[in-house]
Each structure stands twice: as C-alpha cells, then as structure tokens.
Image (tube, grey):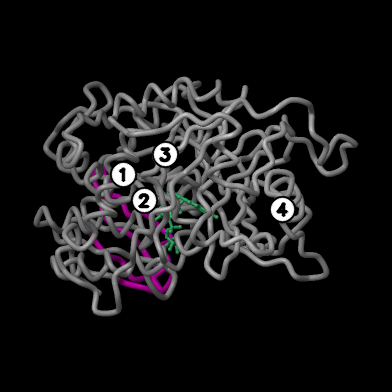
Amino acid sequence: MSEKYDVIVIGAGIIGACVGFELAKKGKKVLNVDKLSGSGFGSTSGSCAIIRLHYSTTDGVAMAREGYYYWLDWARYLGKVDPTGLVKYINTGCMVFKSEKNNYLKNVMASLEEMHVCYEELEPEGIEKLVPIADTRLFGPPVTMDDSRFGEPTGGTIAGAVYIPESGLISDPKQSVHNVQVAGENMSGKYLFNANVVEILKKDGRCAGIKLTDGTKIQAPVVINVAGPHSYQINEMAGVIEGMNIKTRPLKQEVCHVPAPEGYDYNNLGTIISDSDIGCYSRPEIGNHILIGSEDPECDTLEYVDDPDTYNQNFTDQWTTQVMREAQRLKGLPIPGGGKTQGIVDLYDASDDWIPIYDKSDLPGFYMAVGTSGNQYKNAPVVGVLMAELVEACENGHDHDHNPVKFNMHYTKRECNIGFYSRLREINMNSSFSVVG
Ligand SMILES: Cc1cc2nc3c(=O)[nH]c(=O)nc-3n(C[C@H](O)[C@H](O)[C@H](O)COP(=O)(O)OP(=O)(O)OC[C@H]3O[C@@H](n4cnc5c(N)ncnc54)[C@H](O)[C@@H]3O)c2cc1C
C-alpha cells in the first residue's frame, strides 16, 4: 500500500471507528488500521455495552447524555444501513444504590438535574417494588472472600437508590462497530485489517505515518492512537509518554454470566443495578441470565497486566467473589461451581483517574483517544465528533494546551470543553476511581 492518507486511525474498535467516520464526514481521506482480522474484535467485543447516564462528574453525565441520543437515533447517525444488520438499543432502566462511597449520590443527582435527566429517588420499599428479589440490607463496605465478614449483613438498610428510566444496553457491541465501519466506508473511509503497527514514522519534527510488521510504510500527517488496552504501546512508539501527566495501563476484568433466580423473568423485569454497597454492577443478559461486573471496590487487588497480548484469560476467584457479592443482593441467585463459570475476561484501558484522555500529544500530528477505563462505549459517537473537532482545530494552528478547543454538542447543545480530557490535567479527585467514571 503506497497510498497517502490525511489521517490514520490506529484501532478499529467502537471509538476508532467513530473517530474515522467523523473525520471522513469532514472530507478527510481516512484509514483505520487494526492488527485483528475485523472491526470490533478488540476489547469492544467484550464490552457490557451498558448505556447509562450516571457519572461522578457533570462533564461525565453530559457526555453520556449526548451519547444516549446517538444510540436512539442510530440509523440516522450512520446514514447508511449495514446490510448485515443494525444493532438495537434495549431500554432496561438503571437503579443506582446510595452509599457513603458515592456520597449518597448528591453530586450525581445535581448533575442529572443540570442535564435534564429524569430520575426517581427510591426508599428501600421502592427498591423492593422495582426488583422484588432484592435484599435491601446493608452488606458494605465490600470485603474479600477470605474475610470472616464476607457475605454477612453489616446492620441496617440501604439508604435508598436513584432510578433512571432512560438507561439500557446495546444488543451486540461488536456488530455496532461493523455498523460504523459500513457508514465510514460509505463516506470513502478505508479499513485495513491484519495490520500490526510497530512504528510511528516522524519527519521534520512531526508525525508522518506508520510502519507495519511486514515493513509496509503508510504515510499520513495525522495519526490517532485509538488502540484500546494497547494504547500505551502506541504512545511509547510515538515517544509521547513523558509529556503526559495522566497515564494508561491495561487492567484485567472478569464479567460473570449466571442464571437468574428460579421463577424470576430478569430479562424482561430486571434492570441495570449499580451497587457500590456490594461493589458490583449487573444487568439482564440474554437467556434469562444476569451479567455481573465489578465496581472495583478498594479491598480488591486490581490486576494490571504488563502485556495485553499474553495475560491470563481464565476466570479466577474474582469471578466467584463477584457472583457471591451479587447473591447478597439478589435472593435466590445461583452460584454455579464445578467448571460452570461463564462470562467474559477482557481488558480495560484504565487511566490514572478512570477518566479518558482525548487529546493531542507533544508530537505534532499525533493524537490520542485512550484511557477509556471501562466506561466509554456509550460515548463513542460523541468521542468521534470531539476528536474530529480537536484534530481540525489543532491542524489549523489552534493552541489547545493553552486555550482548549470547545464545541457545541449536537443533541444537547451543551458546550463540551475538550480540555476536561487533557493528558496534562491533574488527577480529577471528583472521579469515583472506578468503572463508574
Ligand atoms: C469487560 C468490559 C466491559 C465494559 N462495559 C462497558 C459498558 O457497559 N458501557 C460502556 O460504556 N463501556 C464499557 N466498557 C468500555 C468500552 O467497551 C471501551 O471503552 C471501548 O470498547 C473501547 O473501544 P476502543 O475502540 O477504544 O478500543 P478497542 O475496542 O480495544 O479497539 C482497539 C483496537 O486497536 C487495535 N490495536 C491495538 N494495538 C494495535 C497495533 N499495534 N496495530 C494495529 N492495531 C492495534 C486492537 O486490535 C483493537 O481492535 C467495557 C469494557 C470492557 C473490557
């Protein structure tokens, strides 16, 4: 391939595909490259694809609010219908438990109000009415399985919850990337698979393209790192890590799939639950199963991995711990043993404060949309717009580091200050320091 491009996007996950699509819409000649054999085969394929609106910061809520409308308006966003099928947004609602850890959701409720998101405050009786199999006793703060207190109530009842009816999930995260690929190709975007980037080319003090394992060089004045859990490797190749105050690391996650309690139609009556009292989130999963993920409580040892290509992809005691924690909350939840563990093992690209980095770098022409920390699938279409605005402004000479680029979001009309996601920011202490973001 000796062609030249305006922009190369490294990665064809949901974020990379949306970034490529938006730049193609701006008339740029764009190439998405991925070392895997198709789009969405990376960490996006392991995503729980939850679309929820509660975040710890107002900017987080605003981004999710904007992203939500793209999923509702999916076919129109794409402009071209993927002949292999469009994904569906399935509304389930989301119940977030109040706890000391999340400051009883005071900041979250203020942000939801600012973004005109309807929510309902529930007392324990309201929680039981919504999910009759819920045990509203307090079990937290979470402890590990070897603690004598594990599984025991700690006295009293949960302080209540916030129920946000506008929340749900996407039917098939991998297919959603294919949908965006088809839309991007319709705008003349190109995709190259089985193409492993091993070097970022430089010329005259700026980024000049990429080199692949087989020695192929592809030229472009702009390269964007959207490599998911491999993002730190690409940043290393570009030599830009020194110039970043916030860093990213791959973090192993185990997601459990277990049958719903006997006789309860969780598929139709269940809801997403974010439960910091037990340190888990859950959602309905096809086959009347419940999907259980971790909210990364302080007692757990987070398993950062050195090499995202060779980590232990087996379930461990962490799987059992999460199911047992959820069984505290949902009466009658079976705890499968004897090799019947089901679910997903995958990696987050975790940033130091669990808030992503959407930014330029110290190498002119080299940009990044990284550190998505297990919580940015829902925002991908907005990130596409954000990165396209950022690249356009910076390539036109705008000094983003000193005067952050801003743009008005399409649906909510709110101003998005891209500086919020800067690589140079101090750690954001308003973050939950968990997947909640
Ligand atoms: C278990 C799990 C559950 C999650 N649940 C949710 C959720 O419910 N809601 C939510 O909003 N978010 C969720 N997330 C987060 C969300 O899925 C991610 O933020 C998002 O999918 C990241 O997309 P991406 O395009 O940045 O990365 P990826 O999908 O990982 O894509 C990166 C691509 O880059 C490619 N690549 C890497 N290195 C190279 C190289 N050297 N050369 C060429 N190509 C390369 C990879 O092959 C890969 O395909 C979850 C994530 C995980 C892992």
Please say whether residue 182 is one of the residues in the magenta stretch: no
In this rendering, is residue 176 above or below 389? below
Q: Main secondary structure of the magenta part?
A: strand
Q: Amino acid at mark 3?
A: Ile
Check disc 1 and report the residue beneath it.
367
Secondary element type, mark 2: strand
Q: Residues within 10 Å of mark 2 (few under 14, many from 20)?
A: many
Specify whether tag 1 is near ligand 1 (CB below 8 Å): no
Q: Amino acid at mark 2?
A: Asn
Measure the C-alpha gap from mark 1 to mark 2.
6 Å
Check disc 2 and report the residue beneath it.
225
Residue 182 at x, y percent in the picture: 23, 71
Measure the C-alpha gap from mark 2 to mark 3.
34 Å
Q: Nearer the viewer, residue 411 or 184?
A: 411
- Mark 1 in CB contact with mark 3 (< 8 angstroms): no
Check disc 3 and report the residue beneath it.
164
Q: Residue furthest right?
A: 148
- Mark 1 in CB contact with mark 2 (< 8 angstroms): yes
Q: Amino acid at mark 4?
A: Val
User: Mark 2 against mark 3, which lies toward the viewer?
Assistant: 3
Q: Quadrant of the N terminus?
A: bottom left
Q: Residues within 10 Å of mark 4 (few under 14, many from 20)?
A: many
Measure the C-alpha gap from mark 4 to mark 2.
35 Å
Residue 359 at x, y percent in the picture: 32, 37
Q: Nearer the viewer, residue 410 or 346?
A: 410
Specify whether tag 3 is near ligand 1 (CB below 8 Å): no
Specify whether tag 4 is near ligand 1 (CB below 8 Å): no
In the rendered structure, the answer to whether residue 211 lies left or right of residue 47 reads: left
Secondary element type, mark 1: strand
Q: Amino acid at mark 1?
A: Tyr
